[in-house]
Image (cartoon, helix red, strand yellow):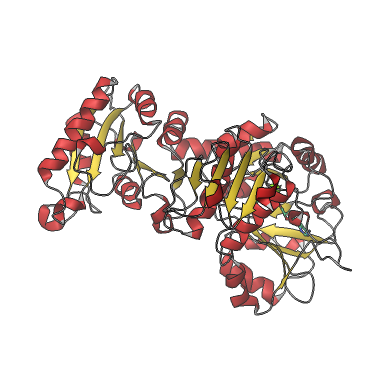
Amino acid sequence: MHHHKSAIFLDRDGTLIEDAGVLSNPEDIRLFPDTIDALRQLQKKYFLFVVTNQPGIANGLVTAGQVAEMNKSLDGILSQEGIHIRQWYVCPHARKDRCQCIKPNPEFLLQAAKDYDLDLRQSFVIGDHPHDVLTGEAVGAFGLYLLTGHGPKHLDELPQDKLIFHTLGNAAGWILKHPNAERDITCDIQLGAEAIRRGGLVAFPTETVYGLGADVFNTDAVARIFEVKQRPLHNPLIVHVSEQRQVKPLVTHISRTAEKLMERFWPGPLTLVLPKADIVPDIVTAGNPTVAVRMPANKWARELITRSQTPVAAPSANAFGRTSPTTARHVEDQLHGGYDVLIDGGACRVGIESTVLSLAGSTPLLLRPGGVSQEEIVEITKAIEIFHPQNKTGKRFESPGMMFSHYAPSTPLLLVDDVEPYANRSDVGVILFQNSAVCFQSPASVLSPSGNLREAAANLYQVMRKLDAMGLSLIVAQRVPNNGLGAAINDRLNKASLKSPPPPMCRNEFI
Ligand code: TXA
Ligand code: MG
């Protein structure tokens, strides 16, 4: 019998090494911290290839000779670490220079398959550009997208159903657990669906954050969600559906505005609070006469719901009051196996929870800013009211998501307009919105180098977690522009700051 090998095709810049523009000098090679380890793990099972797209050649910014020199140098560094790259492919990305990789004919992949007797359907392409993923998929390989390098910048161009990861190490870990990619994740989904049907709990990815789900009609299972999360029973859950027709039995009435909002934003990060039907158990809605419903954009989340044959009640899969999980690893770290199945679908694309909008009153009421911006909603609803927990004069407490006690790291966090005063404090972590001219001695993380709010939202919880793990005395976060997704980001940072314990020192600095 013929035995084919499987391969991993890795993009060079932004995937293996930092993408510092047109790289021509071997001295500029900077490996990512987990590159070596990831490649070591992968080469135990896979042939490794590097593909480097170099439009710089076509544009005359770098010569083919310089690219070859860089590759040779990087190959030397990797060999020293015991990593064997079978072949280095360079594509100049211009037709006149015989670009080989523009769809639908990625010649070099087919060539590699022939030369090395590869089964491309058991192979993977990893890169930080949508092109990398699509090139691989054009020949039957599975594409994984990285948020390193240019990944965040081009995320909007990546088709919705692709898997994304924060680092090469995370992608490698996923591949080793899912060697048959699509087939393996489908199998996890099936196991998850069976668990939900049996009354179990399943942690699953959505485009916003990971959820911890149960059959909405199984009150014992729903009660276990509250137990595992240590969530107070007065905080209601969102009911997730995979098809719009699943909403009708859950509510007494769907208004024209609700219909229009669903049409425009579903599947996606908008949760609608509607008058509830009797069949929705009280434990789900915390005794409220309303129920929150949403259809997630993540295709695996919808597949799970469909196969479960029931709407799925699910809060974010974090311990109560802690930062929401945006990777499967975050879920493991927080819930310590308090679920029956954990479906690993990589990193969450939006990275911040859904917008919660109540349609129970006469005017749509924004209860929680989130993945769909207020501006976008107003285009449909015309009018909108914003719920402020501070001045709830006479108003019933509408959504515990508005409570301060959410989304907090355990290190004290301060939300400020100017982070510069903290630039020299090695004990203070700084969350910057975008690249800054100021040189920070303190551990600083940038949410979006180019100042893009979508990118910033996708990185927010990951950055909060990273700084929280460093044992610092304080984290200061720079307020982001308050438009679009910025309102949701500021809201989370604000809640994290109000929740957190008072900063330990230099109080007068914070006033
Ligand atoms: O993006 C999301 O919405 C994620 C993913 C998993 O879908 N889920 C999520 O769930 O963030 P959770 O439980 O962490 O937040 C749900 C929010 C809470 O603020 C809750 O108070 C509010 O929705 N909510 C749920 N039902 C409600 C209701 N009937 N009336 C008012 N607010 C409600
Ligand atoms: Mg939550």
Seen as rendered, the residue at the extreme right is 394
The spot of residue 87 in percent (x, y) is 19, 32
Which one is nearer the viewer's eye here, 128 or 415?
415
Residue 59 sits in quarter = bottom left
The relative height of residue 331 versus residue 42 in the rendered view (above or below) is below
**Could you tell me residue 114's position as x and y percent?**
18, 34
For residue 71, side relative to residue 438 (left or right)? left
Name which quarter of the figure residue 211 lies in.
top right
The image shows residue 258 at horizontal and vertical percentages of: 68, 71
Q: Where 341 falls versus 366 (above or below)?
A: above
Q: For the image shown, how many numbered marks are present on the structure?
A: 0
Q: Along the line of sight, which residue is nearer the eye, 502 or 405?
A: 502
Judged left or right of residue 472, residue 293 is right
Query: Residue 489's spot in the image, x, y percent?
Result: 60, 56
Q: Is residue 34 visible?
A: yes
Q: Is residue 221 left or right of residue 159?
A: right
Q: Would residue 190 be visible to someone looking at this image? A: no
Closer to the camera in the image, 324 or 507: 507
Q: Quadrant of the N terminus?
A: top left
Q: Residue furthest bottom?
A: 382
- Residue at image location 43% in from the left, 58% down from the top: 156
Q: Tell me where residue 222 sits by quadrant.
A: top right
